[in-house]
Amino acid sequence: MAEFKEISPNAPASAKLGNWLHNRFPTAFDAYRVHMAEYYAPKNFNLWYIFGSLSLLVLVIQIVTGIFLVMHYKPDAALAFGSVEYIMRDVPWGWLIRYMHSTGASAFFIVVYLHMFRGLMYGSYRKPRELVWLFGCAIFLCLMAEAFMGYLLPWGQMSYWGAQVIVNLFAAVPFVGPDLALLIRGDYVVGDATLNRFFSFHVIAVPLVLLGLVVAHLLALHDVGSNNPDGVEIKGPNAPKDAKGHPLDGIPFHPYYTVHDIFAVSMFLMVFTAIIFFAPEFGGYFLEYNNFIPADPLKTPLHIAPVWYFTPYYSMLRAITSEMVYVLIACVWLAVFLALTRGKLAALFKVVALGAAVVVTAMMLTTDAKFWGVVIMGGAVVILFFLPWLDNCAVKSIRYRPDWHKYMYAVFVINFVILAYLGVQPPSQVGERVSQVGTLFYFGFFLLMPWWSQMGQAKPVPSRVVFAAH
Amino acid sequence: MKKFVLSFLMACALVSGVQANTGGIVWDKAPNNLNDMSALQNGAKVFVNYCLNCHAAAFMRFNRLKDIGLTEQQIKDNLLFTTDKVGDTMKVAMDPRQAKEWFGGNPPDLTVIARSRSAPGNGSGADYIYTYLRTYYVDDTKATGWNNLAFPNVGMPHALWELQGKRAPIYAVEEAHGHEVQVFKGWEQITPGKMTQLEYDHMVGDLVGYLQWMSEPAQAKRVQIGVWVLIFLGVLTAITWRLNAAYWKDVK
């Protein structure tokens, strides 16, 4: 136990209260010091660095509005749709709370996608920040589960059929698929049982995991320190420090970055509230028009599309046709061929690789293409976890990478947006071909990264961060 | 970086201009009656008299009509059936099984119908309903004797036919891309209605305005509040901008 400090009886009341608390709960004071007042962040953060704080803000908005929505929402197939309209009409300010929550879902993905892209650009996932990145990827997975299950709750046509389509994907898994889908639905079709379990996961289970991961993400970040746009370590053994040992290129998080973030938050809220008050449906992208029709298990909508934030992955799922499976097999054999001829592997590993390729080919030829679509869709997210070990570039930040790396990232982003766009559209022949090429590029970008990231001449990295006074 | 932002914006522009036209006729633009109280009140009257017999608006309470300028007494006297209470929602007494027999399906609830029928590229839900209620025509091949240009093979007979009269579309055969195609050329009035074409369009406009209002009664208030929220946030942003600058001006 820490030593009890006495304070003069003539001290002001605030000092007495502070001392009283400090004697009983020193951890809180330590935490404030370690994570706020004496957490030194690089002083050269740019605009891209606000999306972490903003995603925390949106998380809080979602939790608080969610609490109030649950007070009036009824997780019952017969009542759910009506209870949402009840919130929109009869609950005082219910429409505002609901729009905050529905807009918040899309805003969450916008800020998180930008946050992830920031990490990609500046190499924030690289040593020693691999765990920060892994926790972040796990948060992204949770977020997807949270959004998917939350989307069923209004019990409109899109809620219902979107869930039906996605849960049916699990049925494509060989052997256990149908039982797995049954386990998820709790029924042979999406129904009241599904709604109840999704509600439970959406309001309790996933948010709990999500909060735990957010804490881990932040603690791990504060242990290793933030990266910055130059990718220069400000706290390393060779980094310049002042007499007290604080990094010269760093600045205390509080107050410098708190005032930064307050400014960013007010700008973000301008956009966020403009959507809430003037365009809450956002042209059918944030609230799909079809979802204003109550779920009808007997009437399949002509065109079922997931909400915009899932559409890149949905495109990849649709890209895997039975023809495309042959392309995937060709890719597998090309990789094996390269490993056998060019790789410096032990003979045993070469045999294993060859054997694995034969098994995978046999599985691909005998299993439904839909299953491989599911594998590709899941793989598109899972592959992000491996990023820290795929990137072999000599430097972290895009600022000092060879120029053509920038074009590579630009094409990656454009490709992602095109896949998202195609996922909204009804299937078409041209769209299918484009999404197949896009899928190959997406995976090629990551799987070939160990090689392409080494190519080209990196520019010299400065020893100090580049900072221009404001 | 700038390139990325630029390409992202371009991609957004691309996305917003999409959502292919799904066929069918071009929708007429519905008049905007959301701020016209007398139009909304007239729309409410038409709705209660003509639509509410078969279609419910099960999430809409009668007393919410106070928002469009009616008093509780006016609602009770003019719009309620004798057994209803003013705090009730707009339900119908029709048996769903009978409905299925008569129309081949249950008439959909109309509370949020105007929101659900929007289709980017074609128009808003109000545009659709405005077009739909004005494109009924007699068709002897259908069980009800009615068909519709905006909603082919529609199950609902023309509930407003007394007002509009009976009509039939006139088609001309034209040549396009080497095929002979039927092109819609206008309407032939078979029997006159109680209203002129202009009066009828006006009345449908009122009704559509009402449906649009009913689909989100808080929408006018939402926009009003939004303006104040943005003004507040504008001031807040200016203050936080200067606050940020004040803290950072000494950081070298």
Image (spheres, coloured by chain):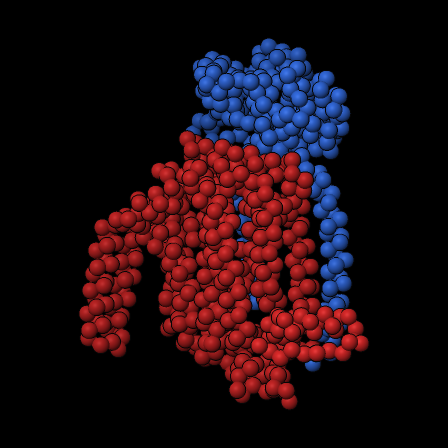
Q: Count the marks.
A: 0
Picture coordinates of residue A256, whole percent (x, y): 68, 72
Q: Is residue B61 above or below residue A118?
A: above
Quarter of image, res B111? top right
Chain A hue? red
The residue at 58%/52% (across/down) is A62
Q: Is residue A324 above or below residue A77?
A: below
The residue at 42%/50% (across/down) is A314
User: In this rendering, would A175 be left or right of A122?
Assistant: left
The residue at 74%/56% (across/down) is B234
Query: Can residue A90 be seen here?
Result: yes
Picture coordinates of residue B109, whole percent (x, y): 55, 27
User: In this rendering, would A42 be left or right of A401?
Assistant: right
Quarter of image, res A87? top right
Question: According to the colouring, which chain is blue?
Answer: B
Q: Is residue A227 above or below residue B176?
A: below
Q: Quadrant of the C terminus of chain A?
A: bottom right
Picture coordinates of residue A3, whole percent (x, y): 62, 79
Quarter of image, res B115? top right
Instruction: Point out the residue furthest to the top here.
Output: B191
User: In this rendering, would A39 be left or right of A209?
Assistant: right
Instruction: Point out the residue furthest to the bottom here.
Output: A243
